[in-house]
Image (cartoon, rainbow, N blue to C red):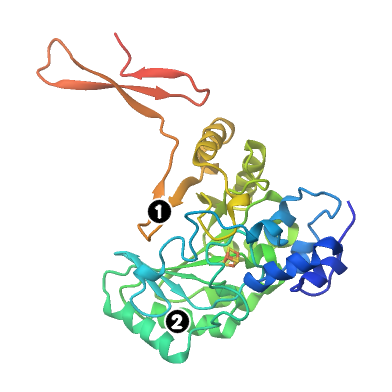
Amino acid sequence: MSKINPTATLRQPVDLVAHGLAPASDLAVLEKVAACYAVAVTPDMAALIDPDDPNDPIARQFIPSVEELVRQPGENPDPIGDQAHSPVAGIVHRYPDRVLFKLVHVCAVYCRFCFRREMVGPGKATALSHGAYDNALAYIGAHSEIWEVILTGGDPLMLSPRRLAEIMADIAAIDHVRIIRIHTRVPVADPARVSREMIAALKVGGATTWVALHANHVRELTDGARAACAGIIDAGIPMVSQSVLLRGVNDNAEALEALMRAFVECRIKPYYLHHGDLAPGTSHLRTTLKHGQELMRALRGRVSGLCQPDYVLDIPGGHGKAPVGPNYLSQANSFSRESEQFEETRYRVVDYCGDVHLYPPKP
Ligand code: SF4
């Protein structure tokens, strides 16, 4: 494998071509894609790409492709309905006890499948204005049912440690907020950003911090990424994972197994495996729900419960997440025991090999 070693984040198609990450013949069309959706490939991610492999799972996540110009019916710039649940700028309030707080619209890398791809990147709104930030805090303060604040974006770890510490303190000062969860791709995309100061900024009195790491392929968990996560966890901050099921990246049992095992080895509990959202120009990266269920069934047979994420679908329109299986239980029949007055239900339950059993078993 030849090595790509840029010293700075690659942000233009011409830079991708110069570093051998895209063919020169694609330049014009990639410029078209980049005019719609932001491009950024950090040196850490570029170094993981094998330019000789046309199916490289890291390249597939970050190198733009002509297929992004294809729109499928049902794709939507706001695929999970953030806007319908945004009472004030920066806040999405979908479930009673928690809100999303979208602080910034920039990321270390821009993922080609991003469900907020119409909202993130240079040229989109950057950070919340002072006034909007104050309004968002006031909203959280006025809603005593909000137990958890989820910082997302963009990537909150693109803020400076000083600013992040101020924000953490502002949120933790609200009595009813007990949990601050931070969703980030920075520990894999740019592990050097996870400095001692950044880790200190994540800790705050008055609330418990959780960090959710977004990674989709085991190769993203480099030594640097593992060290960054260890620094966070050693500071007493628990971590969970979130991944997106992506065609050509992790849509086979071996890739998912390796990823989930690596998370657990890093002390990161697998949390969500997202079915791909209906974001514009992402159909080439989506799988079917049926295939996702088959993979989850395979995973159940290959790795322990510790390594199992929930396979979830964000229902378009802002109706929240639903676990989407597979289902291991179906009703077989009803029966009565001789000595009992009431009816019981007998179920068919499927084991990890796919064999079906009755529960309770027939006498
Ligand atoms: S890091 Fe997250 S918000 Fe940023 S482009 Fe990737 S998926 Fe989207």
Q: Is mark 1 within 8 Å of ligand 1?
A: no
Identify which amino acid the numbered label 2 is placed on: Ala
The residue under label 1 is 315
Near mark 2 (Cα within 10 A), the count class, few <14, some 14-19 or many ≥20, is some
Placement of the C terminus among the 4 image quadrants: top left
Q: Quadrant of ligand 1?
A: bottom right
For residue 194, which quarter of the picture? Answer: bottom right
**Residue at figure coordinates x 29%, y 64% from the top left:** 96
Spot occupied by residue 33 in the image (x, y as percentages of width and height): 68, 67
- Judge depth for marks 2 and 1 and give the one in front: 1
> Which type of secondary structure does the marked residue at label 1 adopt?
loop
Spot occupied by residue 91 in the image (x, y as percentages of width and height): 39, 75
> Which type of secondary structure does the marked residue at label 2 adopt?
helix
Asked if 353 appears above or below 243 in the picture, the reply is: above
Asked if 246 appears above or below 44 in the picture, the reply is: above
**Residue at figure coordinates x 90%, y 55% from the top left:** 2
Q: Are marks 2 and 1 in contact (CB under 8 Å)?
A: no
Distance between mark 2 and mark 1 Cα atoms: 33 Å
- On the question of residue 39 being in view, the answer is no
The residue under label 2 is 169
Residue at the extreme left: 341
User: Going from the N terminus, do you reach mark 2 or mark 1 first?
Assistant: 2
